[in-house]
Every structure is written in C-alpha cells, then in structure tokens.
Amino acid sequence: MNITLNGSQHTHRGSGALSELLKELGVNPDQVAIMVNDRIVSKDERGAVQVCEGDRVEVLTFKGGG
Amino acid sequence: MKHDAPRAAVPEWIDPGPWLESARKAGAADVWRALDAATLDESGFAALLSPAAGVLLEELAQRARERTRAHFGRTISLYVPLYLSDYCSGGCTYCGFASDRGQARHRLEPDEMQREFRAIQAMGFEEILLLTGERTPEADYAYVREAVSEAAKHFAAVTVEAFPMTVDEYRGLADAGCVGVTIYQETYDPVQYERLHRWGPKRDYAQRLDTPARVMEGGIRFAGLGALLGLADPMVEALSLYRHAKQLRRSFWKSGVTISFPRVCPQEGGYVPPYPVSDRFLAQIIFAFRLAMPDVPLTLSTRERAEFRDGIAGVGISRMSIASRTTVGGYRTHDASPDGQFHVSDDRDVATFCAALEARGLEPVFKNWDKVFR
Amino acid sequence: MNPIEKLVLGGVEFDSRLLMGTGKFASVEIMVKAIAASGAQLVTVALRRVNPGRPSDDLLGPLTKLNVTLVPNTSGARNAAEAIRAARLGRELSGSRFVKVEIHPNPHHLMPDPIETYEASKVLAGEGFIVLPYMPADPVLAKRLEEVGCAAVMPLGSAIGTGQGLATAEMIRLIIADSGVPVIVDAGLRAPSEAAAAMEMGCGAVLVNSAVAAAGDPVAMADAFAAAVKAGYAARRAGLMSRGTHAVATSPLTSFLT
C-alpha cells in the first residue's frame, strides 16, 4: 500500500501493522515516536493501530540539539 | 488566661532576622561592596544601613543622587494631600485622629469637596492624595469611591490613603480612577504593632500586612508602602519594608510600589516615639532604598523640616507633598489649625517651595502621566 | 556567605547548574564524553524524522547510560501548535516531563517568537510539563511565562550560535530582579568566563551547546564550563569585592544633616 512516510511517498509491503512497518524501515521500536495522521500513537497503542492506504505516518527519533 | 503572644509572629517572607546582624556589624569593606554591586540583595541592603555606612554617608548620597537622576531626571513630582474625613474607629496611640481623642469630627460633603478640589487645582496641582481614617459609617467605602470618582474629573492622578479594603473594593477604586493606594504597615515589629494599635480593625497585624497585595491584585497601579519611623527598631523597619516591597514586585509585576519615610518627630506634642530616628539615619535609610531600588518613587511629606526636605530632594527622594493641611479640608479657608493628623514642619507655600527646588536645579513636576482613557 | 542551594525546576532538584545541548558534535562518542565532563544533569535533545533505510546514531541509549534527565526541545517548530505536538512526541519518547519550548520562525537569526512561545508554554504547563521556555531577554515576557506556570525562564545571552556572550546582560539583570523562578541563560555564550559572569549576576543556571561542541577540544571545554559555572555560583554566594580604592568625597550633599 502507498502511504506518506515522513513527508515522502513510501510503498509498504506488509499488513499495515506498525511493527512490520518499523521492521521494514530498519528502526529500533524503542528509539522512535510515531504519529499517524497527526495523532500520536503511544507505545501501548502500537499493537492496535493499523496503517491504511493513504495514511500520513511520521516516525521520529532524538537527534542532537541545543 | 490566654495570652495572645503567638499572633505576634513575623511571616518568613518579610522577616529581617537573618540580616539584622549584618546591618549592625557590617564593615567598610561590606559597604563598598554593596555600593559597587550592580544589583543589591538583602545583605547588600543591610550593609548600607550599618553604622559603617553611616560613616560613608556622603558617598551614599553621591551615588543615590546619580541613581535618582538616572531614573527620574532632575525633577521632583509634587502631590497634595486632602483629608476627606477625620472620623476614625482606630486606636493608634501615635495618631491625632485616634478614636479616643476628644475633638469634634468632620467630613467633607460633596459640595465642600468640589470647592476644595477647585482651590487645590488653582494652586497648580495635578496629583491629589485623598485621606480618611479607619472605616466608619461616616466615611465608608462608598464615600471614598465617590470622592475618587469626583476627584478624577479634576486631577490627572488620584491616590488614596484610607482603610484596608477587599480586592473587589480596590478594583472599584481603580475603575473610579484611583492610580495609587498608600497603606503603611506603621511598624513591622509585631509586638510593637499590637502595643500601639490598641483597638479597632487595625489591631490585626497580618491583615494589615496583606493589604498592599490586595491593592495590587485589585489592579491599582501603585501600592504605597511605609513604616512610621520611630515606633520600633529602625533597622527592623527598613529591612522588613525592603523585603515587603521586593516580594510585592515579584508577585504583582503589573503594579509598582512607592515607598514613603514618615517619621514621628520627638518634638511633636503628645506622643514620644520609643525609637527616635535622627536626621542622619533617616537620610541613610532613604539612600539605602534608592541604591537598592533605583526605579521606585521615594516619597517625603511635609512632616519633615524645610532644610531636610530641600537637602534630600533629588538625592534619593523623587516625590514630595507641599502646602499640606492635615485637617479635614482647609485649602479653601487657608486653615492651618493645630488639630491635624500630624504636625506640618514644612509650611511653605507652593511657589516658595518650587523656587527652592529650582534653586537646586530641580524641576517641580505637577503632572507625570495621563491615563489613556478616562 | 549564602548557603549552597540546589537548582529546583518544577519541584525536581539538581546539583549541577550547567545544562548541556547535544547538537553539533562531531560524534556521539565525543558528545557523551563532553556531557560526562560537564557534570550536566539536564541534557537537551531535538526530535527529528528518521531516514528510512539509513539508520542514524542512537542517542537515547548512550544518554540513558549517562543517567541524565532528557529535556526534549521543540526546535523546528515555527508556531505554538507545532511546538505543542513536538513536546508531546518528545515526552512519548523520553518519558521525561521536561520540555524546552523553542520556537523560531526565522531560519537565519533563529530568534525565538515571544507570542508563540507564550501560547505553547501556557498549554504545556497546563498539561503537566515542566516547561523551560527559550525566550528573548524581555523582563515582561519573563513574568508572563512565569505566570502561566513555566518552571524557569531561559533568556538568550545573544543570538543562537553567535558566541557574542552576554549581550543582553542588563535585560537579564532586570529579569533576575523580579523573577520567582530560576533564570537560565541559554544561547550565545562562547567562553566559560561568560558563564561565570551570568552566574555572578544571579542566574540559576546556564545552558551551553555550540560553545562546547565547536570548541577545539569539546571534552576539555565542557570541563572548563563546569568549573566556570561552579566558580560563578560560588562568587555570587561569596559577594564580590568593591572596585579599586575609594576616595571619600567631602560633604556637599550631606552638609544639611546636622
């Protein structure tokens, strides 16, 4: 399915489960915060959220900053 | 029998205790350090009150004048007090209006008020201070508010020195055009306070102490603070007053404080102050406040002699009254009767006083600012 | 001498009065060493998008090992709504109630937007965040931010990254005089002496990043800032001596006093 990931087009080749998406992106689930369609998905909620066609997904992590 | 001693406690936020020692024992080095500091805290202020600072009084004066000039220019703001009423329910030992004094009581009726306003306006004043005693049926909140409302039609600035009010009452005064409320603690020493305020609503130290905060919460632009010097250890008074002013500025940043330095003069008939304050020490206290709070208007009334007032004008003091009558009304009739609230030591007229200021390079200012909307 | 007091932010106590940023370091390894050398207990981090397929250095792991409190910032936000969202995401990831509200719409000088900063701080303080707002050195704004529940105010010493030191010193003095919360100088510092000067003025803490990250030896510079902040704080407690020798004037101003 096609989604917008961090502002760019991304084709997800899985079921839409967040765990699958993160695996596909090669990121450690403990090091990211996720937002789907402007809604923050807490770590507890991740298992229950499915990404659908056209969704806007943000995957964020900490970088250096002042 | 129950003693009421536990009520006589100084709240931590104004307690001068921790700094009294430095106020008494600071050395010259401590004083110089305070003089050179960009900003002062309690210990610096305490050092400026010390005997060692007294030796350096001229240096304090020089620097106080620099600060006064920087913030207020070469000007002195003038205001005039008008006693609306001398009815009083209070029992302040030191006051000529106390309720056990035998004199007949008066209050200004609306038509008399108008005539007094016009007489004062004719003298050139744009700022008026309206005074009453403690709350009485004759001079209650409605009476004061009405007076403010009327005065605001004549004067650019109306201030009030009356009785403690509620926040809502102060908000009402602000709406009526009041820009400042003066409410002296009289003494910050709770033991002396209870001794001197023998009855009436003013007996409650804590209630009195919280009043300036209510003034500011009610949206009044300036709260006037002061201790009646002579009633208790002046070191305690000055330090507590400093802490009180500082706390109020922190808590209510949209309002300002003014500080006055009323002194009970020993030569006055009737009351002999237990802690008389000398001219030199009064000047030192004023300089210390100027250095610690460079942007706060410091006020001196006509309680003080002409020589003292002329000498300290612009050297710390930035705001003064003149041509004061301390009896009810009295401007229209030029009455200077001896039954006033306190003895007027500087009884010069406006023109003479202004000439004295001008001779010292100071411009008398009758009007400082206008409200945007009236 | 005044007693040593802890830095208290939102009811949480800290021994260190130096806060560190984590940006602009050559490597995570140097950053970690510099933070350790600084003794900082509060460390700011930024939130950024991950690059798919290009995993970046992990910051969270090493910082967790340092046992510091993370302060996610809202950099990148250009208005209050974006900052609020960034703060919530930051809390989700850090588990920390601290947030540094940082909103700079102009990409060149990066000066903080006072109005958006105020709006975001109000909302976040209401949500239980410990809000540390990065702000212009404005005494009125400082009281406004205190009023809406900020745990500190963080006026800039000079523009971010300029290293111009305490260009706003006189405004910061006014802020300190009336502030009921700690004043933390953030941004613009270059030399440890400037951090010491800020502490001597009465600041509660200082926050540095570029000054350490861009120093010749960041780890040694972090150590120098730590020492400077301690020295400045100690000097404040001790009370500075007076300047030079003093000649006492004759008495033209006090001759009226008998």
Image (cartoon, coloured by chain):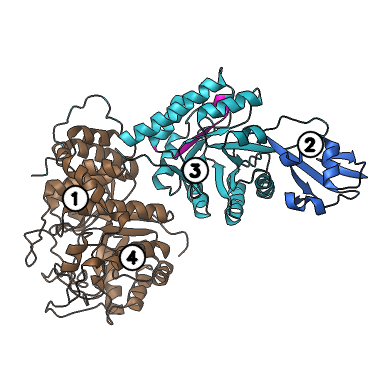
Chain colours: A blue, B brown, C cyan
- Give the residue displayed 82% in from the left and 44% down from the top: A19
Front in this rendered view, residue B136 or B157? B136
In this figure, which residue is indicated by the disc labeled 2?
Answer: A27
The alpha-carbon separation of the residues under discs 3 and 1 comes to: 35 Å
The alpha-carbon separation of the residues under discs 1 and 4 comes to: 22 Å
Task: Mark 3 vs mark 1: give the one in front.
Answer: 1
Residue that protrudes farthest toward the front in the picture: C65
Front in this rendered view, residue B271 or B238? B238
Residue C253 seen by the camera? no
Image coordinates of residue C258 in percent, x first then y, are 7, 44
Q: Secondary structure at mark 1?
A: helix
Image coordinates of residue B146 in percent, x first then y, are 36, 75
What residue type is disc 3 on? Asp
- Give the residue displayed 58% in from the left and 51% down from the top: C129
> In the image, is B368 to the left or to the right of C139?
left
In this figure, which residue is indicated by the disc labeled 4?
Answer: B211
In this figure, which residue is indicated by the disc labeled 1?
Answer: B235
Check residue C138 in the rendering and tell me which mark sits there, or answer none: 3
Q: Quadrant of residue B337?
A: bottom left
> In the image, is C176 to the left or to the right of C159?
left
